[in-house]
Amino acid sequence: MLSKAIEELKDFASREGFYEKKILLMFSGGKDSSLALYLLKNAGLNISAITFIHRWSWREPLPHMLKFTASLGVEHYLVDITESLLRNSLGKKGPICIHCKKVMLKNTYWFARINGFDIIAKGDNANDKIKGALLDQWGGDHRLSTIPRIGIPILRPLINYTAEEVEALAKEADIRVFRMYEYGRRRQWREGCPLQYIDKEQVIKEEYFDLAYKANYEISKIARKHKVRMSVLVPSFRIMCHGCNEKALKEAKTALEGIKRRSANASSGKN
């Protein structure tokens, strides 16, 4: 299955003239973007990776991401978007991911333009929202489109593969990603960053960024210990868990009580 996927990508790349192009992949370090990078590199394309970080990003996955790109011989850029994220999200309604994705895409566009990249690549698969209503507006092959219309074409090498097929391909390629044992946002295991757990109905405040990181960092340690998937929404402190047992939940509630007290004391000190 993996060799077939690489050959199909080679054929597509030849037809579209990709071998004369520089491609920049938005690389989160997750299974989708890791597989996309693997396929593009093994298809012989001129591919580089860009990863966006901010003050509240998980620290733990980064060494694994750098090791993976180094093993492929791929140039890997790290860009800090802390200030842009704050500027474009504070005072707005959630979810934070909507605002963050806009910041990342805009930064990718300008990075690509300044550094001579011709194509932006993403790890979207057939289960992602872009497939269907949005890409149906595109008359050509969904793997290469100008949607969203940012001025640079976007390559999606996985867009015709379901999440289950991506899982199988990644397994065949022996791609292993670092897990924070988050609850994830979808049925399949989809991790991200702790800011996604700010309650959607909240007006976004910087204090929620700090709280989301602190609470979910503690929760992730408990989840890893019990081999369950768990996260907590803030400021509601509602626990979400796949496969939880009473012991894990009890430990999580105890940890969160401590975080709530410290947060309340800090707020009182400010007032």
Image (cartoon, helix red, strand yellow):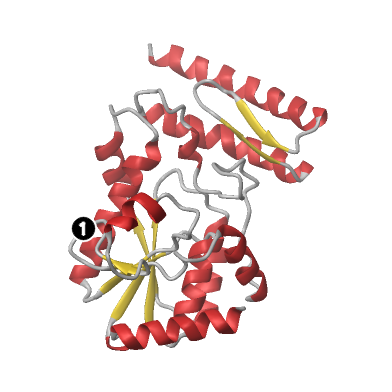
Residue 135 position, x and y percent, is 33, 57
Quadrant position of the C terminus in the picture: top left
Q: Is residue 14 left or right of residue 249?
A: left
SS for callout 1: loop
- For the question of whether residue 39 can be seen, the reply is yes
Image spot of residue 68 (x, y percent): 55, 72
Image coords of residue 70 (percent x, y):
51, 77
Image quadrant in which the N terminus is located: bottom right
Q: Give the residue at x 61% y 43%.
A: 182
Q: Decide if residue 176 is on the left or right side of residue 71.
A: right
Instruction: Identify which amino acid the numbered label 1 is placed on.
Output: Arg
Q: Where is residue 244 in the image (x, y as percent from the top left)?
A: 76, 34
| Residue at image point 36% right, 83% down | 13
Residue 45 visible: no
Relative to 144, say whether 108 is above or below. above
Position of 191 relative to 2 (above/below) = above
Residue nearest the observer in this picture, 17 or 136: 136
Front-most of residues 218 and 197: 197
Query: Along the horizontal axis of the image, is 139 left or right of 162?
Result: left
Q: Identify the residue at horizontal 21%, vertical 58% (top origin).
A: 149
Residue placed at 44% from the left, 16% from the top?
267
Which residue in the structure is indicated by mark 1?
149
**Residue 49 position by quadrant:** bottom left
| Image mark count | 1
Q: Nearer the viewer, residue 111 or 44?
A: 44
Judge whether 241 appears above or below 153 on screen: above
User: Looking at the rendering, which quadrant does residue 219 occupy?
Assistant: top right
